[in-house]
Amino acid sequence: MPRILLPDFVLPEISTLSGMVDTVRAKTPLVQCLTNAVVMQFTANVVLAAGGSPAMVDIADEAGPFARIASGVLINVGTPYANRREAMVEAAHSAQQGGTPWVLDPVAVGALPVRTALASDLLEFRPTAIRGNASEIVALAGQGVGGRGTDSTAHIEEAFDAALSLSRHTGAVVCVSGERDLIVQAGHSESIAQVGTPRTDRVVCVDNGSELLTKVTGGGCALGAVVAAYLGILRTDPFLAAVLAHSVYGVAAEYAERQASGPGTFAVHFVDALAAADGGAFAAHGRVTVADDMAAKNPENS
Amino acid sequence: MPRILLPDFVLPEISTLSGMVDTVRAKTPLVQCLTNAVVMQFTANVVLAAGGSPAMVDIADEAGPFARIASGVLINVGTPYANRREAMVEAAHSAQQGGTPWVLDPVAVGALPVRTALASDLLEFRPTAIRGNASEIVALAGQGVGGRGTDSTAHIEEAFDAALSLSRHTGAVVCVSGERDLIVQAGHSESIAQVGTPRTDRVVCVDNGSELLTKVTGGGCALGAVVAAYLGILRTDPFLAAVLAHSVYGVAAEYAERQASGPGTFAVHFVDALAAADGGAFAAHGRVTVADDMAAKNPENS
Amino acid sequence: MPRILLPDFVLPEISTLSGMVDTVRAKTPLVQCLTNAVVMQFTANVVLAAGGSPAMVDIADEAGPFARIASGVLINVGTPYANRREAMVEAAHSAQQGGTPWVLDPVAVGALPVRTALASDLLEFRPTAIRGNASEIVALAGQGVGGRGTDSTAHIEEAFDAALSLSRHTGAVVCVSGERDLIVQAGHSESIAQVGTPRTDRVVCVDNGSELLTKVTGGGCALGAVVAAYLGILRTDPFLAAVLAHSVYGVAAEYAERQASGPGTFAVHFVDALAAADGGAFAAHGRVTVADDMAAKNPENS
């Protein structure tokens, strides 16, 4: 796990980071998920495997009150039925008011009108983190449109500028999933009242993961719920929380890929591996690299 | 399978009970499920594995008519979208009118307002059985509130009084899931028109199961559907039907646990094991104990 | 793969057919699925495994625009919530207008009123293919009612007349799933403006498959999505597209059955097998037989 020292940003020691992973598991974060109908089951199983307790509370009049007591909240705008949209706005508002960290997953935003408007509205409630693929992050940042459903047509590095801009504009940690995951947090000279906002930009690449995650529906969506779990426990530094969530998730995927003979067996072994992935697994297999802007744009040079 | 003789209640011979299990499988009960969006797929697969035919008919104008022809009905109040609430009331009403046995699963009742009111309304239609964890049963009995989502924070034995009270009040067989499952049916001096109501209280502990069932989303919810399947065939004694459903389900879980390397493989092997679990498996591995009140409250002494 | 020559219909060479299978995989069809809530996850995973890209875009105002850019569309009328019904009509209309091939799956039509009316309405938009079990096809053709949920009570061969009538009336390729799958396309002397309508009737039996597909929820529903994927790429001959989809699907099921110890492991290995099933697998294991009407009615003689 090579580390590049930046003026204002150094990754903590591995032992500290792996201890943070174990803390998340020890505290069993209660993760409220308002997510799309396709991936609800897989997401709940993944949250359980990651050491959390999932609660898919996604109707109006329940979503708001629950967002106050949850450790973290995921709002994924896929299959945005009218009643669920209402619950999403209620939950996001309540999370913001109550100080519950929450994750926005702008699935297929840019390609489809209802969820694009919804995601834009939800940004008003200041997500703690945003997780998507490159196309979705670019679209959400207003820098372009694209994507076909949940496939990403924008290269991950192309999304770097969008991610940094989106982070600067919203205060959120922005996570771009791809072959190489990119976690970005813009520094703010004038703080905009988000927990853990650093003075300078922070960028980390996570090189854990498996191509097979893209062959299982919910492979990306469920990661958003794991990020919410980590945010819920590691509240003082949402950036590190997001980085650790991505790395642990990817470490489990690498293990599962070695057990798998295809996407069906992969999904099953992934849940097993995630359930076993603790701080020690992260310490042994995590691949997290601090990057400066250029490194992020040109990963071959990093 | 130790048996304690009570004045008014003796378990039938094992051969009789195992024959009842085989009867359920031979008759392929048609199980209508109005259940939460998270567990629909798993529940349908579990019903198939248990020897039933699942039908997730959960919209208004279809749910009512279908509840008349189904063998048994499950109503699980998770993700209670407005249209599904309407269908649930319709199905419960129709089941009661048509004499179709039905199961109420009060998932997360007590913790969340919409479903708590809904479950209370549904009690008016006299469920044949109620299945939940200790917190949910306590909440439904009006003896307390608690729980965080689907986790149970009340100890199973604490729920005994609530279960007995709830059974006495509603006429339902009440099933409390936990490390040790508790199946309770209150006797009634004045019968309240439920099939199979005994003269004295009946309490059975089922000690089959696996901790891993709590790590798979729907592990409890799908059991409710299996109870509905057994109720649908073994109509003369809903109490024994519920006991057998719990034991067979738990036997399959024990087998799956031995095959599993984590919750992902467990869920897959559980479906296989349930598909193979017949009367012989119950006879060999079922652990069902008749308990008096004190034994139920203090299982270590039983 | 025996072939019976009919005056107007000869199956292409195996090498041509297997090349068509590889073409589908190479082009990654974008498959929009408006399907029932029970099988969304399994269907998405199956589409991925079949080489497609699934997009479960099923809300009004998104479903219509997306149906114009999708390669193919599946509309399955299970769990027909009101908002989804609206989206289904929108998508079918848009698919017809935009020339996107689409599949109608009339799940449980005949047994349940809301979806029966819906399916009838959807026929107005001229599905490219219709896929169901024998009871559903018979019911949709208006020749009877029956079925209990998704079980078929009509024998597959009994459905032949219904399938031919339905195809003649609608112009759709009609696929009847059963132990032996039947794919039917009626010839039209006066063309009704469907792509690839032949001059004479075409009937093919596909003898690939596994009984275990009936023990996994979505085993039939997901096939409809695979048909949509094949229709989306092999546009000049929707009949052959449907035949190939059924055969490849069944070949994967046969392989999975050999790996499985029950329906749980079967479902997992099926996804793996489908992900590996290419033109070569079809050439080696496909069992597709051209049948004349009598052969279809009396398969023992074919």
Image (cartoon, coloured by chain):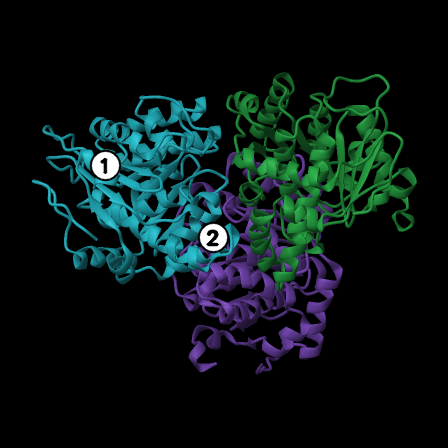
Chain colours: A purple, B green, C cyan
- Find numbered disc 1 in the image and state the secondary structure of the residue it sits on: helix
Q: Residue at x 26, y 41 (%)?
A: C100
- At label 1, the amino acid type is Ala
Q: Residue at x 76, y 48 (%)?
A: B287
Q: Chain of mark 1?
A: C
- At label 2, the amino acid type is Ala
Q: Position of residue A21 (x, y in %)?
A: 68, 68
Tell me: residue A261, above or below residue C264: below
Q: Is residue A149 visible?
A: no
Q: Nearer the viewer, mark 2 or mark 1?
A: 1
Depth order, front residue of B270/B28 = B28
Discs 2, 1: same chain? yes
The residue identified by callout 1 is C296
The residue identified by callout 2 is C267
Q: Which mark is residue B110?
A: none
| Total numbered labels | 2
Depth order, front residue of B237/A273 = B237
Q: Position of residue B128 (x, y in %)?
A: 70, 27
Left or right of B275, for residue B133: right
Q: Residue at x 23, y 36 (%)?
A: C296
Along the polypeptide, which appears first: circle 2 or circle 1? Answer: 2
Left or right of B24, for residue B203: right
Q: Residue at x 87, y 42 (%)?
A: B296
Q: Is residue B66 visible?
A: yes
Q: Chain of mark 2?
A: C
Residue A128 placement: quadrant: bottom right
